Amino acid sequence: MVCPRQKTRRLVMPSQILLSLPLRAAQRISVHGDPEGKVLGAKRSMRRIVLFLTALALFSAAAIAQQSAPAPTAPANPEFLKAADEVLADVSKLISLPVKSPLKKTVRTREEIREFILREVHEEREAAKWYADQRALETFGLIPRGFDLQKFVVDLLTEQVAGLYDPKSKEFYIADWIPIFEQRMVMSHELVHALQDQHFDIKPWSEAARPNDDAELARHSVLEGAAIVGMLEYILREQKISVKDLPDIEQFMRAQMTGQMDKDSQLGKSPAYIRNSLLFPYLAGTAFAQRLLKTGGSWEKFYEVFAKPPLSTHQIMHPDLYLSGESLPPVSLAPAVKAVPAGWKKLDENTLGEFGVHALLKEFLGEARAQRLSPAWAGDSYAVFEQLKTKRVLLLFRLRVAADADAARFFGAYSEALETKYATRAHLFRRPNFFSFETAQGGVFLYCRNDECFTVEGASRQVFDRITRAMRWPAAPRPADTKPAEKIAIVPQAPSASGNASLSAP
Ligand SMILES: [Zn+2]
């Protein structure tokens, strides 16, 4: 199962619907062995067996459903509603959150749930934000050009949804096509959300992170991670095993999910970035929640996270840094944004976070290098612009890393990534901390200094110089035969209402 977040990164999908997604991934797994685990050796191996079977149960639920007779068309409403009440009572005890008010719940058809998702996708995020995300992700190279992001996400969520809790109406939507065995697991996950909502009002809590997409993804990961852990506690309740006593469950879940992904599903066909964004809150969020539970020792202690939310996906990916109270200064793009010439409309200014930087490096350089480099993330900011006349995109990205040596490593790696992304390039110019070339989409520049790297994609050299000057960075090296930037007449002007100074477009 699993319930993907609504934000396919930068893509806040209706970040408020908390969906339960069965991982069709695993539909073809068959269950081996006895779920009760007859061969119980040392406690440690018993735990492994229990965990293994739990995961099998989770991932094979859909397979079992397929093997049994076709699902009845008339939903077993009374059975589902009664089950929801039972599961709610159990989960409430397991995660130490008393039921404060009666649960609103309805059984819905797939079509009704699809309509709900469509509505949310339109209501929760403006069309302009979807468009901005699409253009930014295309330019970063994380989705193909011309990819219809919004439509893809709606189809993906509709395919994967197995249940849903809507914090706006405080209502639990029970999917009528999910068999009762799987239904109880889905319920245990969704009802954690219902209880979280009764105690912590999760919609405003998540939205308080806006407009920072990365911080919102971090909060979403708390909600989903806790819901996965709550679901596991429910599944393990009869064995009297708590998730805080289990070894690292994230690695196990990740291996199961990726190993069994159905290649023909919408999820399997997703660009890697979208799939990873969707799964991040369930995987990294689960590891984070498990770690907090192990450290604090109780759910009561865990709930302190609502008063002190993680600030970034960096803290989700490194719970120790969250626990130690790491606080990183923000990375500002304000002077750079102001220096962008008129004629370019700013679509969005936001943060990729460690999750996004990892995705970016992984896309072009593979998992191992992404894994080595991205933990040095210490803050970032990007801004995406569109030229009104041509629809061309200009992307600024400023990254801070932990140390100067990390910036040097990032420079080497990202130079390669940029070359891979732009197959056709001309006028390559390299210095130890500066790299630029020309493409059909405009100039591409990578410039590192101390513990920071800055990229501009889609601008002329003249505009790049103007922007770095506004940031008070020293002029970047330039080929000897080019006119120095100072000789080009640039008249800085007061920022316009849109925040952009005017200057002829590059
Ligand atoms: Zn969820």
Image (tube, rainbow, N blue to C red):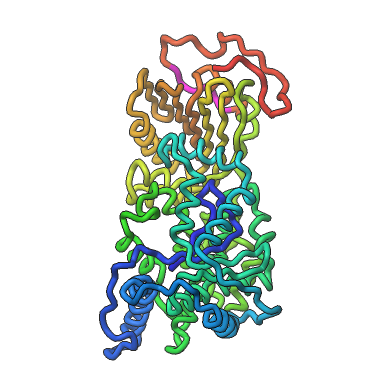
The overriding secondary structure of the stretch rendered in magenta is loop
Q: Which of 255 and 367 is in front in this view?
A: 255
Answer yes or no: is residue 244 visible. Answer: no
**Which image quadrant is residue 503 in?**
top right
Specify whether 69 is left or right of 172.
left
Counting from the top left corner in percent of width and height, residue 378 is at: 53, 48
Query: What residue span does the magenta drawing correspond to?
Result: 473-478
Q: In which quarter of the image is residue 48?
A: bottom left
Quarter of the image with the C terminus in it:
top right
Left or right: where 482 falls relative to 7: left
Above or below, comparing residue 274 to residue 92 in the picture: above
Q: Which quadrant would the N terminus be assigned to in this image?
A: bottom left
233 lies above or below 21:
below
Task: Name the residue located 44 percent from the left edge and 24 percent from the top edge.
Answer: 441
Residue 84 falls inside the magenta stretch: no
Compared to residue 429, the image places residue 315 above or below, namely: below
